[in-house]
Image: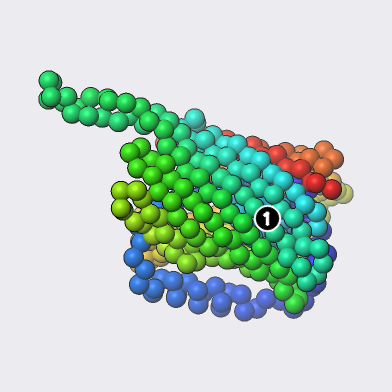
Amino acid sequence: MCGNRRDSQRLTRGRRPAGLTLSVLCCLAALDAAPVQATKYAGEPFHIGVGGRALGRGGAFTASYPEASSIFWNVAALAALDRPEVMAQHAEAFGSLLNHDFVAVTVPARDDQGWAWGAYGTYLGGGGILLTAYDSTTGEARVDSEARHGDWSVGFGLARAGPRWWSWGVVVKAIVRDIPQTSGWGLGLDLGWWGHWRRARFGVKFADITTTFLSYNTGRQETVVPHINWGGEIDLPPVADGVTATVAAEAETYFENRKTVAQYWMGATSVDLHLGLEVGYRDRLFGRIGSDAGVLAIGAGFVVGRWGIDAAMTDHDFLDNTYRVSLRFLLR
């Protein structure tokens, strides 16, 4: 379950996807040139990755063989599912500053022409926000109250196998924001493409492809510019009996003029790299290490029957560490 290496029973092997690079580059150019007016970082709470396995691999997961968290990472991969699965996650980001929870259920297609589907929900929030007010007696600011904040999202996705070695999918999502003294909601759409060739897998996620909008009760409106996650992974030749290894790389590409906040940038386009290595023993025990946009990530996982548990952490220089644990269960 954690790190299954079987080729899809629903996706047949075919020729190498030689046009993938050109297609992705064309999409990058088109999005970078699009005259979209957006609010920088407006979608950030909803772009944080999910799943202990993914974090241990540095967030390089868009091309991964499917599991329940694929409904978030790349819905197209769900077409390769062979059994239904549920997942639950809890994470504490930057110490106890933020709580990040995720639940998902995914169901495979009934036949080669059918649709796989899945649904998920996420929560990101915390407390300790001090609201201040002006003290007319002292002429200084004072703490008036303490508040909490929360961001929720729910999504429903469908995926279908293509004619040969690839699949595609779409996710419709709704988001709700509860911020001190204001609240808002929004709707968005993600598209995914996933394929495999021999030992390699490839994935592209077009997030917020329709420019997700956010509307607040104050009358303020924000939009989230589309961004792209694209990458690949490859299974290395076995080095010992029962030992498997997979290396993965992914580019998270934004068009919000992030500049020096990102690892690499040119004009309005910025890129953060995610790199990961996963080593498994008899598909039961797993160790992982990665680079999550330059931040060290490590993790481990094990499988017992139909249960799988994955845990990971990231080491931050200026903030407390992030810890994430996820539990998965095969329904049959």
**Which residue is more in the foreground, 133 or 194?**
133
**Total numbered labels:** 1
| Side of 327 relative to 253 (left or right) | right
| Side of 28 relative to 69 (left or right) | left
Please provide percent x and percent y for residue 187: 48, 58
**Which residue is more in the foreground, 249 or 256?**
256
Q: Residues within 10 Å of mark 1 (few under 14, many from 20)?
A: many
Where 35 sits versus 326, above or below? Answer: below
The residue carrying mark 1 is 118
**Which residue is more in the foreground, 45 or 188?**
188
At 13% from the left edge and 21% from the top edge, which residue is drawn?
138
Please provide percent x and percent y for residue 172: 56, 60
Where 69 sits versus 94, above or below? Answer: below
At 70% from the left edge and 39% from the top edge, which residue is drawn?
327
Q: Quadrant of residue 7?
A: bottom right
Q: Quadrant of residue 114?
A: bottom right
At 54% from the left edge and 56% from the top edge, which residue is drawn?
173
Q: What SS does tag 1 mark?
A: strand
Residue, far top: 137
Q: Is residue 11 visible?
A: no
- Residue type at tag 1: Gly
Which of the colour schemes (rainbow, by chain, secondary structure, one colour) is used? rainbow
| Side of 304 relative to 90 (left or right) | right
Where 3 sits versus 128, above or below? Answer: below
Please provide percent x and percent y for residue 321: 51, 34
Please provide percent x and percent y for residue 176: 46, 48
At 78% from the left edge and 71% from the top edge, which residue is drawn?
113
Q: Is residue 157 visible?
A: yes
